[in-house]
Image: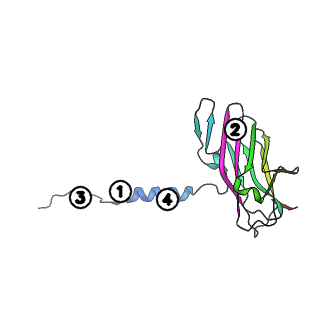
Amino acid sequence: MNRGRRGRGGSGRTATVAAVLLVCLLIGPGPVGLQAFQTGALDRASSLETVDDGSGGVTIEPYHGMQSGETCMLADLSNGLGSTLSVTVALRDDATQYGNLTLGSGNEGNEVTFSLAVGATERVEIDLASDVSDGTAVGFDVNASDESVAVSAADRSATVNESRTGTECSST
């Protein structure tokens, strides 16, 4: 005589798994193209993680349509923190041959430093060499700080995409 329990079987688990998958599909992967600082260090040696790139205190939006031989947007940086920051953007060592960074007032070289007010956005551009190949990822690092907070975002990149056109580049 089989006196096993009878129940709904796996249908309860199946419904739960289906609900979780549906929520994941509805939320999606989040904003594409936006990057932010992943961690921050405070005076008391604390560390702070952000929720996602779009919710970061300092957001980085790299451009993925740069054109060789032109001055193009490398990235827009926005300050969502509560104080003015000193920000440095530097080309990674493996990307210095691709061009010079600029804030729109001439070529500054492999690194630019500027103040970024609360709520402000600054565009960092790169004067790309004419021999940079389509599909090249131009790597850069970002560091920002004030009297009490220091944050950094390493290994960010913007991409050369010769087929994309827009207003983010101008002939040099």
Q: In the depicted view, which residue is nearer to us: 66 or 106?
A: 106
Q: CA distance from mark 2 to mark 4?
A: 34 Å
Tag 1 or tag 3, which sits nearer the N-term?
3
Q: Which residue is mark 2?
A: 81
- Identify the residue under disc 3: 6
Query: Measuring 75% from the left and 42% from the top, which residue is drawn there?
Result: 87
Q: Which residues are magenta?
A: 136-161
For the residues labelled 1 and 2, the Cα–Cα distance comes to 45 Å
Residue 22: image tag: 4
Q: Nearer the viewer, residue 6 or 37?
A: 37
**Mark 4 and mark 1: span between their CA atoms?**
15 Å
Q: Is residue 47 above or below residue 69?
A: above
2 sits to left or right of 68: left
Residue 139 appears anywhere in the view: no
> Amino acid type of disc 1?
Gly
Return the disc, 3 or 2, that comes first in the chain's sequence. 3
Report crowding for label 2: few under 14, some 14 to 19, many 20 or more residues within 10 A (C-alpha): some
Q: Element at badge 2?
A: loop
Mark 4 element type: helix
Q: Main secondary structure of the magenta part?
A: strand
Q: Residue at x 67, y 37 (%)?
A: 150
Q: Residue at x 59, y 32 (%)?
A: 45
The image quarter in which residue 152 lies: top right
**Which residue is pictured at 76% across the width and 38% down the height?**
86
x and y, in percent, of residue 78 in the image: 73, 45
